[in-house]
Structures are given as C-alpha cells and as structure tokens.
Amino acid sequence: MWLGSLWFVAPLFGRATGGAGRLRDALILGVAIPFGFGFVGLLWPVAVWLCIALLAAVRLLGRGSAEPPEVTASLEGRIGAALPILAAIAAGWPAVVRPLLQGDSLGYHLPNAAAWTQAHSLWTTTTNYWFYPGGSELFAAGLLNAAGTLAAGFAGLGALLFLGMRLYEWGVELGVRRWVAGAVAAFVVSSFTLAEQAGSLENDVWLAAFFVEALWLGRAKAPATFGRAAALTALLKPLGWLYAGLGLGIARPSWRIAAIALAPLALWALRDAVLWREAIIAPASSYYPNLFGTTILAHGWTGLVTLARALRESGLATTLLFAAALCSIAFARDPRLRLAAAASLAIFLLDPFGYINPQPQLATGNSLRYATAFLALGGVFLFELGRRMPIAGGMAALAIAVLNSSHTLGIFWNDATTHGTPLVTATVAAVLVLPWQRVKLWALPATACALTAYAVVLAGSHPLDYYEDWLGRGTSPSRFFHWVAATKPPALVGYGLRIGAISAVSPATRAIDADVHNPCREARTLGALLAVAGDIPVGGRTSYAPRRAFAERCGEIVFDDGNTIVVSP
C-alpha cells in the first residue's frame, strides 16, 4: 500500500512523460518524507501515513476531470517497454520472497534505517556507519515505518526497475528500435553485478539509476526535475556527491538549481557535524588507516590484473558492459557521455575499499558493484551499436539477458519459495503486453499489489530459520533468533553479529552496533544486553572463542546456545 501510494501521488511533482519519470518521482518522494520527518524528530508511522494521505487527497482534488486515456502503443513498443521490467522482476523476485539476507544490507544498510525508525529521528549514532549519507536507507526507513522489515527488499527492486525503464526510454530517444532498446536495457539490469542488488538494500544501483537520470535530464533541459534527481544522487553513498557534481558540471544549470541539488547533502553534513563529537560509535572506528592503499589504482598493474580477473569471473554481461563503457570514453558520439564515463571510471579506480578492506574485495568480485554507474553508461553506449546493428545486437542482448536471469534464479533454486519466479514473470508479461489500455489501467496495479502482498507473505513464512542457518555453523544449531523473537529485549548490542538480522526478527528491539574497544561498557551504559557471536570478524578477536571468554567476564549469561552468547553487563 505504501509503494502504491507513492506511485499515486508522484504526479504532484508534475506530469512526467513515461513510466520512468513517474517512478523517479515516487522514489524521490519515498526518500523525502522520511528525511523530512526524521530530521525534525517526527519519524513515526502515523506521521508518514498522514503525510501520504494528505498528498493523496491533494492529488484527488487536483485531478478534476479524468485524465485522458493514453494512446495504445504498438506491439513492438509494448514488448520493448516490458523487457527491462521483466528482467528486473526475474532478478528481484527470488530475493524479495525471502527475508533480507544480503550481508551488507544486514551489516549496515538495514541497521541505519532501523535505528532511525526506532529513534523516530535521524539524530542517532548507534550504528557503525551512522554518518553515511542515507539516500536509499531513507527509502527503506519509510518502508519500515509503513510496512515493516519484510518489505525492505523492495527498495532495491524499485531502483533496478527505474534504471531499466530509464535506459529503455533513453534508447528509444536515440533512435533505437523499441524492442532493441528494451533488450539492451534488460541486458543491463539482468547482469549479475546489478541483478544481485534487486532484493537488497545495497545502494549502488540507486546511485547508478539517479546518476543516469541526472545525465538524461541534463540533456532534456528539465531544470527543476534535474535538481531533484541530482539532490538524491548526492545523498547516495559517501561518494554520491562526486557523481552529483559531475552531473551538475555537465548540465550546467542555474545557481538556484545547483543550490537545490546540494541542499539535502548540506543538511546531512550539518547533522554529522553536530553529532560527530559525542557519537556513541566513534566515526574513526569505521575507517581504514590508509584509505588510498585500499583503492584499485594504488595497486597499479596488480590492481588492473585483479580487476580483469574479477570481471572475467563475474560473467559475460558485466565484462561486456565494462568493455562498452571503456569504449564510450573514446568512441561515444555524445561528448557528455565520454566525459561522464571517463570520470566514473576514475571514481571507481579511486573508490576506497575498491581493492581491499580487512577482507579481499576486488579478488572476490565484491567491489565490482562500485562500478555500477560506469556499467550503466556502458549500456547507454550499446544503444549506438544497437542503432547500427539492430537485429544482431538486439538478439544478442536478449539472449544474454535470458541467460543472466536463468543464472540468477539458479543461485536461489535450492529454496523452494523461489520456484514461482518464471510464473510470476510470465504473469507480469501477459499484463504488460495487453493491447487494451483501459483494462491495463486496472490490471497492472491489481497485479502489482497482489504480487507484492504475496512476496511479503512468503518472506514472513519462516524468517527465523534463515537467520539461524546463518549463525548455526558450530557443533549445534543456533536458536538465538527464536530467543530474540520470543523475548523481544528492549535493546541489544551486537558484537561480531550483523545487527540488521536482530531488527528483522524483532523490530521492537533497539539493535546497536558494538564499540569494538569496549562493547561491555557500551552495553552497560546504554542499559542493553550484549550478544556475542562469530558471524563476522571484529577488532583483534577474529574467532568466536576469545569473544565468548570476553562475554563471560562481562556479566550474567541470559542465553547461550554454543553459537551465540547473551549477557547482562
């Protein structure tokens, strides 16, 4: 209902041409509402629902007469527009029918959103990365307030849908045949580096989508809309401001639009400055001693060789997109695309942790997601090839998109809840290609609502088992999350534990990251229990046994299953 409400009121921003424009405004509104209420300490479910209800009332009163019916597109147009949507759904459905499981999503994306929801405010510092600009996490916070944690994965799916729809419309604008534009857009969003983010809270696809949107709007000379897109780009990831600045430099809007684009980031910086000194989790503890040494460029030829190996192992689609983006630097017809691609490549090569953090990043392919914006620009360049070789290029892109989707589904296939993905994708395809516009106007929203509700039901069927399988790697199965769900402790400090999982199974529990220097003192000060696990390495104590000994000295044991121990300091 929340997602549908955002879609309904999105036209208040102005009549957008095409579905991508409306989805863009819905996503921006989904970030703006939690940001506004959270900044003033009023982030309550009743507040966000009252806000959306008022906006819906304005939308209804402002409509007057019914909107004129849209012109029915040709069969080729309907198929082309459907292809990226179907690719995104095929990528996202296997993830959204399960509880949120992706590591970084549970490690810091969901904890940030849950901390703001718990505090009803952005002015909290109980997570490791509380100071990170929270664009996509703010959208997740809106979902948590309106629908709960089981719906959080739709944040990633929405961004992937938006990217695919915008790429399709950009390709059509460049003169590519509609089915070819749809095939190329589907090829982009189905590549595993992008597709694996469809049901998570990772924000790389968000950044790519709104960076591409800022570039497209800069070409379209839509200053007000450009300002909104650039503003959200700046709030995505610590380096989002670089992409926003790049978009501003290419578009060269008026100083008023530039000020609007940078205003939300300025407010976020003000928040960080106020909270920095007295933060519960010191920001310095989240940094690496030598940031440049963690970049790909710092490792010279070894870094480039490792990058080539990671691309090869990531699959054909990601490799081709990276190669296309490299070619665009020299051969793209639009000089703005050449500049954007060159700058995006430089940002990727200089991105902190792109090569290594305490764990290998590039060697495992994990940091290829930092190149998502660069890969998306490779997709834009492929439209030029699609215009010259429409049949061969379109068929190749479509075949690779199908293979990509099959590969993604195969990763999840051992989970029976994902087996409905082909049927769900076929159902959506049947609705999208309907030639009767009046029928589609009610059939598409009805299908979307039904499938969203069904996905949330499936995700909530047995979430505790998923999380306990994650922890139960010792000699006995874990029962920690059953205990959390049953007792719902008011506050829990997680040491060696992705605390997003605590928020997922017990939204009422205040989940707090551990201060690695003295988590026992932190838990005692905050009046919280201390949970110690062996999920992730922290500080110098990389194994569970030293952490457990530390916990036993901290206080009285209130839970112990051999994998996780909870004490009361």
Image (cartoon, rainbow, N blue to C red):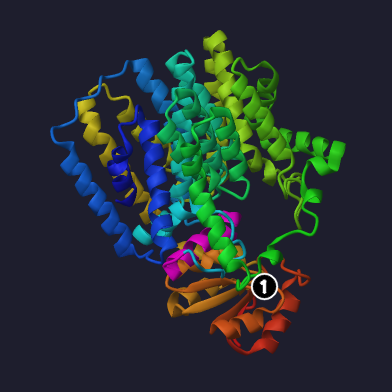
Residue 375 visible in the picture: yes
> Where are the magenta residues, as a range?
101-121
Residue drawn at 63 percent across, 42 percent down: 369
Asked if one can make out residue 566 in the rendered structure from this viewpoint, the answer is no
Query: Going by the image, does 159 lie left or right of 320?
Result: left
Image quadrant in which you'd find residue 27: top left
Q: Amino acid at mark 1?
A: Thr
Which residue is depicted at the point 44% across and 69% down?
118
Pinpoint residue 191: horizontal percent, then vertical percent.
Answer: 58, 33
Mark 1 Cα within 10 Å, few/some/many (few <14, many 20+)? few
User: Is residue 104 shown in magenta?
Assistant: yes
**Residue 183 percent coordinates (x, y):** 49, 22
Residue 40 lies in the magenta stretch:
no
Viewer-nearest residue: 145 or 87: 145
Can you say whether 529 is above or below 85 in the image?
below
Chief secondary structure of the magenta portion: helix
Q: Nearer the viewer, residue 114 or 336?
A: 336
Q: Disc 1 on helix, strand or loop?
A: loop
The image shows residue 509 at horizontal and vertical percentages of 46, 74
Residue occupied by mark 1 = 475
Q: Nearer the viewer, residue 15 or 296?
A: 15
Is 201 left, or right, of 280 in this rendering? Answer: left
Residue 551 in picture, x, y percent from top left: 67, 83
Judging depth in this view, the residue of 276 and 101 nearest the camera is: 276
